[in-house]
Image (cartoon, grey):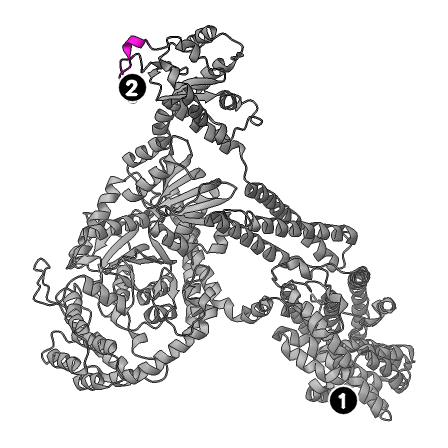
């Protein structure tokens, strides 16, 4: 279950099947991203692919001496572009691959446009997702939900991405979802629908234990994306932002021209092995400096974080001029999420402090939005068990000596969920199966999907679980991969600004403490 | 941790697509073919010299004309036909249109289309000649349209009337023909380029095989042949370079300049060709020069001989051992002692067994001094017995026993060492490349002797330290001289055996190599203790206290041998060293830095500057990357554990799959065995984890 390899194999197959000769790869915006995640330029050059073109580009020359490999999402626009292309072909021969299921009528209209018989292949290759790491995939959808419900376009794209993933890994799974999330249920149903409709596609060799698809909602753990993530990849994402394994360094002062955009490719790398990335050496020093700056800045804040339980400390921290507006807001969010229902919750006071500190309204609004997004009311499970609270306090107290720090000790909630799942102890009343059948044995092949985005820290968790649990293979996916900033954008996009905008259809669950 | 993964699901729509396309295309193709056939008929006769009426008859026979009365309006423009707006028939499909909507086909154009399948060239018409312009020229005669005798007017010598639809179809067909025939320059060049690349892929491995063999001093391939091949491969590289450069600059001076995409394509082709050359050329090792090759051959021959001798030695030794055991048994039986000679994997060595042969080898052939000692004492005992000196026999026998014990212990060590060395030898082969450079350097160093050896040893892998520390041990030649003397001297006085000018025996050996001195440096303490021990054991000490200096200088090598691995091990070790030294002088020395044109460096041969050790000794320094082998040997030991765990995990997964498979097929006994296996693996894994964490 290696998603990078799965997509790469598709691309390799396309290129191989087109035979020798100069080739052009004709893609759309999304498939360009998909291919670039799994193939480097020099690698693909070796396979005689010399040009990369967008199907929607108007400035394409007629080059009859090239073979065209088209890798496109089966959207209406793409089909239209392709019809135009086939009516007046620019290349000698066309190998057409759609990244997902295409309708018969589209195939017919394409066939009718191909009067010159330039099409040599029409296939579906299900590489319809961004393979970030061998066991992490993303759909690059930011802001998938309006309120608590899916945007229709996002739901359809997510369903397509998820079913394509299943097909590319040849898995026909049983589905479990997070009961507290309407969106999770909806997505589970949509995926099931596709599986039922395309049943002949999903006929794979049966395995002893059927694979499992677990659909979660980000709002169940809003803490993880708010914390700093301390793996290398996560740090880079937090500080610089990674988009399709590309880092935009153009804002770094004094950066040389070649380094404006750096590709961070972990393709040939065991994920996180030694925290080393092949193409990273060049920007190593830049990153190192940035990291050092960051660390210089952070510990001061953390030292005082020792007992976040102590409200005064949070207060004092907020007054510390060195704490940035963003971090201050983040701190209050963490506090708020933690002590949401606590009797002596002094959130209003902290909010006042934020205002006094001059934190912009945008951030202050975000605090309530985050609570609305990921507060207890919506959480299906208990993020902070009493035990956790003690453990966290303990961590705060002891964790600040030396290199260890609070943030590295945070275990994403996903870890517990998956741990229970692997051991067959995940409660069915919280994470029910879709449909009547349930899994008798412990699951072996697991696909976890987080609506609202995964994080690199969770990817690390999955990686570690894969390594330490023999016989269990887990792949993690999300509508996107978040850092704190993008997560807050996600929260903003969901439009949950205040409690007053109640979404009554969400079952209000009182968190049951263990 | 990733198990092999098959290609994901796919679904083909090709048959569906073809079905739909065929429905449309069939019609189209039939139409085109019909038109072409008619066109052929229409142009098959000499139009210019045929009467127009006759032409018309022929035309009507090709395709039935639509009845005039049936078509009151022009189907294309809708104008009413009249006496002024006359009807015209398409000669290809027989339909009717007005003059305005009429098209014409020139004979050359018709010719081109009809002959396309037969002979394609020759009749290339440029667009300006094509009927569109002809149409314009016809305008002049429009005034005469109204004439009743328009039939005469319509006599077209060199054109054929047709409708727009037929014309369109034919034009499309023409385009297709053009494309089929026309091969752009870039394609021609590119095809050549690919051919060259294929050739390289074919020839380069062959050459590398040859060069490696030659550099090892083998005579499987001839040097001339190899260098010919090298030249050939290099030429292909140059061709690739030239071709890709040509592609890069195609049409650059054209006006208007080529489309940016064309230029991009050219750049990319060039770039990938450069990548190709860089990557492949880097692996193309150089050949030894003629002199070097002779040298290499000699070295290899020597080594082969040495190996042969070793084999013979083993045979001889086994004989010797047999004899020895007999004599020992005899002597011991007399004393009532139990003899326990070890057979072991390590053969006992007797100096006499192979000494005569050692002459041809020079240097490194040696015997085990202990064994000689034992042998000598045995003969002493025999003589003492013969002389009837029983007390002396007693002392000697006690002495012999101790020596025997010592020797046994040494043999055990030797055996252990041997097995370890075997493992190491495999490692050595893997690290050979690295060693090549290191050795070269070492040779330089060895001339400086002693102290410098220290640093070198340290810089090497840990495993190598042992042999080098013990290097002095391979010096027992000193001792050999001594032993020889002993053997030849009479038994009566061991002192006499001892005395023969030790200095003269030692001196040449010292010149040959310094390590004895070094050995003392390394093992001062152990040597002293050994020396003492020996002193107490050694009968010669007692008998000849008058030559302490001689004893002092002589015994160290013996002492070393007694606690280190045996001499023979070191000896075997040596050839390796030498071979590599010799090889290191040259191969890989030109790993071409990836300059834009890698051929520039080609004639620069490394052995032109062999005297500067850092350059010739460590060719990898020039390479763009750091020596990869160094990393290998560094990370080897640490990297092992996790890999093993990974393997275990994989194994577990595999076995799980097998079990599942077996279950499915109902092979229950197999399931049982596999499950047992799985359990065991899991246990190992758990243990290992416990160990590592």
First reached walking from the N terminus: tag 2 or tag 1: 2
Is label 2 in contact with label 1 (beta carbons under 8 Å)?
no
Observer able to see residue A183:
yes
Q: Which residue is mark 2?
A: B75
Question: Is the stretch drawn in magenta largely helix, strand or loop?
Answer: loop
Q: Chain of mark 1?
A: B
Residue B212 x, y percent position in the rendering = 70, 57
Residue A57 x, y percent position in the rendering = 37, 48
Q: Chain of mark 2?
A: B
User: What label sits on residue B536 in the rendered view?
Assistant: 1
Task: Establish whether labels 2 and 1 are both on one chain.
Answer: yes
The Cα atoms of the two marked residues, 2 and 1, are separated by: 130 Å
Left or right, residue B449 beside residue B146: right
Q: Which residues are magenta?
A: B67-82
Q: How many C-alpha atoms fall within 10 Å of the one at disc 2: few (<14), some, or many (≥20)?
A: some
Relative to B231, say whether B631 is above or below: below
Q: Nearer the viewer, residue B309 or B332?
A: B309
Q: Secondary structure at mark 2?
A: loop
Relative to B307, say whether A94 is above or below: above
Any magenta on residue A147? Answer: no
Left or right, residue B396 beside residue A94: right
Left or right, residue A400 beside residue B390: left
Q: How many C-alpha atoms fall within 10 Å of the one at disc 1: few (<14), some, or many (≥20)?
A: few
Query: Which of the 4 image quarters holds residue A201?
Result: top left
The residue located at (19%, 60%) in the rendering is A427
Residue A375 x, y percent position in the rendering = 15, 68
The residue located at (35%, 26%) in the rendering is B24
């Amino acid at each position: 279950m290696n998603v990078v390899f799965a997509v790469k194999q598709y691309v390799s197959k396309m290129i191989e099947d087109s035979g020798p000769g100069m080739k052009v790869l004709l893609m759309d915006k999304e498939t360009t991203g998909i291919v670039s995640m799994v193939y480097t330029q020099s690698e693909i050059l070796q396979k005689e692919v010399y040009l990369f073109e967008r199907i929607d580009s108007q400035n394409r020359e007629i080059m009859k001496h090239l073979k065209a490999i088209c890798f496109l999402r089966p959207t209406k626009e793409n089909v239209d572009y392709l019809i135009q292309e086939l009516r007046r072909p620019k290349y000698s021969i066309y190998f057409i691959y759609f990244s997902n299921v295409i309708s018969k009528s589209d195939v017919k209209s394409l066939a009718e446009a191909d009067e010159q018989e330039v099409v040599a292949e029409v296939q579906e290759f299900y590489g319809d997702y961004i393979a970030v790491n061998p066991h992490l995939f993303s759909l690059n959808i930011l802001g998938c939900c309006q309120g608590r419900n899916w945007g229709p376009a996002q739901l359809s794209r997510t369903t397509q991405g998820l079913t394509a993933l299943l097909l590319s890994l040849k898995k026909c799974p049983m589905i479990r979802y997070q009961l507290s999330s309407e969106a999770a249920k909806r997505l589970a149903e949509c995926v099931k629908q596709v599986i039922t409709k395309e049943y002949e596609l999903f006929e794979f060799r049966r395995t002893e234990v059927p694979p499992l698809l677990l659909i979660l909602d980000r709002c169940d753990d809003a803490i993880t994306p708010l914390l700093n993530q301390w793996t290398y990849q996560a740090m880079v994402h937090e500080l610089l932002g990674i988009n399709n394994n590309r880092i935009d360094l153009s804002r770094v002062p004094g950066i040389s021209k070649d380094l404006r955009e750096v590709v961070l490719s972990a393709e040939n790398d065991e994920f996180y092995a030694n925290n080393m990335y092949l193409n990273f050496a060049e920007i190593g020093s830049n990153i190192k400096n940035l990291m050092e700056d960051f660390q210089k800045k952070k510990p001061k804040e953390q030292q005082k974080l020792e007992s976040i339980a102590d409200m005064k400390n949070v207060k004092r921290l907020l007054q510390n001029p060195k704490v940035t507006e963003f971090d201050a807001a983040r701190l209050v969010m963490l506090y708020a999420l933690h002590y949401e229902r606590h009797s002596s919750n002094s959130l209003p006071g902290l909010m006042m402090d934020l205002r006094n500190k001059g934190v912009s309204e945008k951030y202050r609004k975000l605090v309530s939005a985050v609570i609305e997004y990921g507060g207890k009311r919506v959480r299906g499970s208990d993020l902070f068990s009493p035990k956790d609270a003690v453990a966290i306090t303990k961590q705060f107290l002891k964790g600040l000596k030396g290199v260890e720090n609070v943030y590295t000790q945070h275990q994403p909630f996903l870890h517990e969920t998956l741990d229970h799942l692997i051991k067959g102890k995940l409660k069915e009343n919280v994470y029910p199966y879709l449909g009547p059948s349930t899994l008798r044995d412990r699951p072996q092949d697991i696909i976890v999907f987080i609506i609202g985005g995964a994080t690199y820290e969770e990817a690390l968790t999955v990686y570690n679980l894969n390594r330490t649990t023999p016989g269990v293979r887990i792949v993690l996916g999300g509508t996107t991969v978040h850092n704190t900033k993008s997560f807050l954008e996600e929260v903003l996009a969901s439009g949950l600004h205040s409690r007053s905008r109640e979404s009554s259809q969400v079952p209000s669950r009182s968190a049951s403490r263990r | 941790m990733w198990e092999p993964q098959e290609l994901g699901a796919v679904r083909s729509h090709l048959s569906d697509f073809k079905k739909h396309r065929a429905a449309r295309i069939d019609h189209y193709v039939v139409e085109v073919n019909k038109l072409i056939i008619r066109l052929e008929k229409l142009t098959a006769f000499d139009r210019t010299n045929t009467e127009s009426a006759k032409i018309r008859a022929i035309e009507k026979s090709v395709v039935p004309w639509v009845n005039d009365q049936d078509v009151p309006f022009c189907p294309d423009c809708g104008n009413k036909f009249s006496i002024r707006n006359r009807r015209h028939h398409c000669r290809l499909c027989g339909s009717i249109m007005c003059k305005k909507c009429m098209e014409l086909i020139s004979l050359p154009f018709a010719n081109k289309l009809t002959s396309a399948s037969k002979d394609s060239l020759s009749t290339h018409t440029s667009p300006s000649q094509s009927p569109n312009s002809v149409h314009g020229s016809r305008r002049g005669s429009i005034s005469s349209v109204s004439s009743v005798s328009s039939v005469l007017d319509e006599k077209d010598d060199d054109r054929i009337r047709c409708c727009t639809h037929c014309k369109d179809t034919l034009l499309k067909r023409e385009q297709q023909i053009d494309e089929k025939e026309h091969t752009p320059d870039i394609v021609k060049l590119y095809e050549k380029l690919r051919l060259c690349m294929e050739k390289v892929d074919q020839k380069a491995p062959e050459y590398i095989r040859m060069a490696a063999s030659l550099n090892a001093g083998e005579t499987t391939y001839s040097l001339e042949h190899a260098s010919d091949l090298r030249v050939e491969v290099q030429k292909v590289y140059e061709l690739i370079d030239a071709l890709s450069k040509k592609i890069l600059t195609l049409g650059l001076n054209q006006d208007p300049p080529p489309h940016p995409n064309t230029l991009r394509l050219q750049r990319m082709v060039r770039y990938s060709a450069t990548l190709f050359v860089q990557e492949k050329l880097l692996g193309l090792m150089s050949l030894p020069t003629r002199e070097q090759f002779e040298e290499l051959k000699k070295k290899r021959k020597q080594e082969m001989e040495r190996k042969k001798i070793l084999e013979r030695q083993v045979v001889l030794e086994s004989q010797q051992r047999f004899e020895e055991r007999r004599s020992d048994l005899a002597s011991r039986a007399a004393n009532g002692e139990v003899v326990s000679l070890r057979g072991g994997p390590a053969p006992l060595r007797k100096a006499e067994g192979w000494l005569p042969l050692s002459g041809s080898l020079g240097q490194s052939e040696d015997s085990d001094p202990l064994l000689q000692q034992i042998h000598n004492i045995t003969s002493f005992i025999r003589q003492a017995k013969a002389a009837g000196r029983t007390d002396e026999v007693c002392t000697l026998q006690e002495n012999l026993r101790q020596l025997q014990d010592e020797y046994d212990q040494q043999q055990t060590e030797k055996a252990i060492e041997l097995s370890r060395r075997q493992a190491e030898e495999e490692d050595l082969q893997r690290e050979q490349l690295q060693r090549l450079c290191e050795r070269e350097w070492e040779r330089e160093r060895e001339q400086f002797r002693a102290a410098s050896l220290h640093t070198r040893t340290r810089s090497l892998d840990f495993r190598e330290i042992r042999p080098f520390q013990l290097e002095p041990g391979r010096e027992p030649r000193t001792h050999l001289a001594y032993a020889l003397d002993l053997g030849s001297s009479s038994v009566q006085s061991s002192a006499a055996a001892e005395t023969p000018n030790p200095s003269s025996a030692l001196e040449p050996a010292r010149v040959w190599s310094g390590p004895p001195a070094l050995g003392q440096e390394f093992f001062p303490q152990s040597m002293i203790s050994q020396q003492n021990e020996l002193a107490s054991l050694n009968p010669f000490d007692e008998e000849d206290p008058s030559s302490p200096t001689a004893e002092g200088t002589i015994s160290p090598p013996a002492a070393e041998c007694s606690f280190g691995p045996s001499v023979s091990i070191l000896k075997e070790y040596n050839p390796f060293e030498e071979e590599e030294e010799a090889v290191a002088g040259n191969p890989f020395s030109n790993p071409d830095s990836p300059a834009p044109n890698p051929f520039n460096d080609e004639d620069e041969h490394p052995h032109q500057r062999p005297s500067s050790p850092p350059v010739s000794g460590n060719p990898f320094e020039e390479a763009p990357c750091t020596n990869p082998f160094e990393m290998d040997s560094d990370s080897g030991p640490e990297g092992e554990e996790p890999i093993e765990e990974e393997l275990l995990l994989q194994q577990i997964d595999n076995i799980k799959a097998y079990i599942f498979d077996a279950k499915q097929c109902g092979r229950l006994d197999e399931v049982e065995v596999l499950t047992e296996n799985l359990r065991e693996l899991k246990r190992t894994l758990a243990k290992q984890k416990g160990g590592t964490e």
